[in-house]
Amino acid sequence: MNKKERFQAVREKRAPDFMPVWPRVQSQMLFSYGYKLPEVTGQDWYDSDKVTAAVLKSIKEIDYDVAIPSYVDYGFGVPPLGGTIWIPDKFGVAAGTSDDQPVKTKADWPRVKKMMATYDVKKKDPRMAGCLEVMKNISAAVGDEMPLVPMYYVGTTAAMFLFRPNEAFLEDLFEDPDWVKDMVEVATDWAIDWISAQYEAGANSICFAAETMGTLMMSPKMNEEFNLPCIKKMVDEVRKRHGQATWLHIHGNMRPPKAYEYLTKLVKEAGVEGFHFDENCPADWIKTEVVDKLGVSACIITDGAAIAKGPAEKIDEAVKNDMAKIGDGLGLMMAPSCQVLPATSNEHFKAWVDATHKYGKYPLNQ
Amino acid sequence: MAEFPELTQAVIDGNAKKVLEIVNEELKKNATPQSLLTNYMIPGMLHVGKLMQEGEYFIPEVLRSAKAMRGALELLEPLLGQGADRQSEGYVVIGTVDGDIHDIGKNLVAMLLKGAGFQVNDLGVSVKKEVCIEALKAREGKVILGLSALITPTLEEMPIVIEALKEAGLRDRIKVMVGGAPVTQEFADEIGADGTAEDAAGAVDLAKRLMQS
């Protein structure tokens, strides 16, 4: 099987030749190839050549099975709206938003909303334009054999990153829910256009939507009120415009009854095809309660500490243990989540990918 | 469902306006600031922490209660300083580590600590180790240092600060608690911290234990 066929098998709950692997967080990928963020991006620029080189090198050397074909961060779209993004000069931290967000008070919202109505996602922000350039380059280089996944945030996460300082936004949820719904709707429409631009630049597989507030920062009830309709809209639009399904990256423990009920609605009502969880959801639970019961695909999350520390033999053992917990393993792939230390060497990462391919041979556990 | 006094319930509900109203009324009736804090407001915040641990409250709800508490504390703190009845559970220096600007979790912990009767010196975000050391040197006796990080890459700053405490000769009297989404007990043990907690309410319990240890 090639990488596209392998991922397709996971999506259809068929046996691949071996378990495919999701890529590393992109800022860490850049860091692991020696780039600090200020060397590849600023408030209004983005070095497509350097990012292209790092992404291609990463794909070639680490041998992931799915790629997010550029470096995408929380700050996209923000500077042209009047905000300032934070670009850390060390470690492998992604650029993010600061308190200098475009909507400091509700009085700023009409101006920003008006700007959003005419926002050309391909041109307005030079960083996003640069990102699309990288996607074109990666598509030309490996798009024939590799699933290339467009990525951005959705719902409250998108609205918070685009418009409001974090804590103020969380207060808005109670103090002005109608305004939040307005911001969330505008942000999601913008996000859908941005995802579309990535497809036009060469993305060729599922849409990867991220809702990082999840059940860590919001109750399932709030998620149903604010996020479920947005996620459904993104799923529907991506299917309509590009014929692709959507996977959701969501943070938090989805095991309690109310959280699981929300998860079920994400599948049954919003039409999410697959999930990329975080460490709060163990592999055996994902297999039985998500893949088998809800009938969707999902990523299992590896032990980040084992990958960071190594050595290769221990990484090998950790992956072997993971595989023993997931029965027939159908509908699953391996993922590093967000919580992998950037100091994790490429050698350890490669050892983890190789171990997944070695112990993840199908039929599994027979 | 438990019934609480009106002020306590207003804190639990995050009703800032009502909390302030009741506090003002009670002060006019000669209630002491310490009694309002200890008997009504702190139990409210502790119950908020319990609801968070039980999965009933999430960060927005806790922030709302913390904001209500903060409004009343602004009114009460100057009065507490003047009063003879001021009690303190301990002194905490807290901050988000260098390289990390996320502060919601740190702010929550700081608010809950204040609500629980601790004096808190909040150093803010992306705090350099030198700033931590300076703040700790300025206070004698046992002090708790709370270090927060949301993003995994900045976890690496935590052992650097602990090492700096040793170099400055402060480690014996400083209790270090570390926290944030990526922090585990294993990590806390590995870097030589004195503890971690699963959530903001747990951080208050931990701070109390550390002051008694």
Image (cartoon, rainbow, N blue to C red):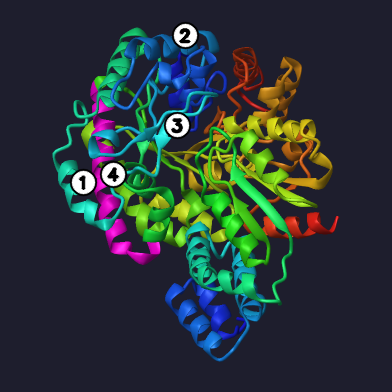
- Give the residue pinned by disc 4: A102
Callout 3 touching callout 1 (CB < 8 Å): no
Question: Where's the N terminus of chain B, which quadrant?
Answer: bottom right
Of residue A251 and residue A112, the one placed in the foreground of this image is A112
Which amino acid does the dot numbered 4 rest on? Pro
- Give the residue pinned by disc 1: A112
Mark 1: give few (<14), some (14-19) or many (20+) Cα within 10 Å: some
- Give the residue pinned by disc 2: A57
Residue found at x 74% / y 55%: B206
Which amino acid does the dot numbered 3 rest on? Arg
Which of the two discs, 3 and 1, sits closer to the camera?
1
Residue B155 in the image: above or below residue B199: above
Res. B191 visible in picture: yes
Where residue A304 appears, as percent x and y from the top left, is 64, 30
Callout 1 touching callout 4 (CB < 8 Å): yes
Where residue A84 appears, as percent x and y from the top left, is 33, 36
Q: Earlier in the sequence, mark 3 or mark 1?
A: 3
Residue B30 in the image: above or below residue B163: below
Gap between marks 2 and 4 measured at Cα: 36 Å
